[in-house]
Image: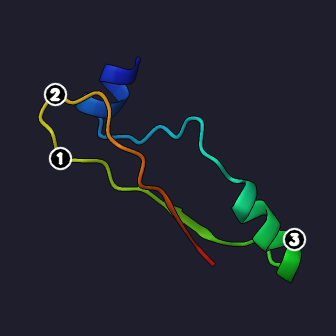
Amino acid sequence: MHRQLLALLGLLLGELWKLSALAEACARDGRYEFLLTAKPLNLVGGVGSPPNAMAVK
């Protein structure tokens, strides 16, 4: 399924992200809204990319 979703459809899959720092920041300021974005490497037929997710509060 990864090949179809990533390489053929261009969808991102987020797996095993470390979100503890984000959860602590949200709890600290009481604000739980943010934009989560990630841009994969542009590789023809690629089925993986280094993690580079970013949360913007």
- For disc 1, the neighbor class at 10 Å (few under 14, some 14 to 19, many from 20) is few
Residue 36 image position (x, y, % from top left): 55, 62
Where residue 27 is drawn, which disc sits there? 3
Mark 1 residue type: Asn
Q: Up-down: is 19 above or below 8?
A: below
Quote the CA–CA distance across marks 1 and 3. Answer: 35 Å
| SS state under label 1 | loop
- 4 horizontally vs 36: left or right: left
| SS state under label 2 | loop
Residue 8 image position (x, y, % from top left): 24, 29
Q: Give the residue at mark 1.
A: 42
Q: Give the residue at mark 2.
A: 45
Report the front residue among 31 and 19: 19
Q: Nearer the viewer, mark 3 or mark 2?
A: 3
- For disc 3, the neighbor class at 10 Å (few under 14, some 14 to 19, many from 20) is few
Q: Residue at x 15, y 39 (%)?
A: 43
Q: Up-down: is 18 above or below 29?
A: above
Residue farthest toward the top in the current orientation of the protein: 1
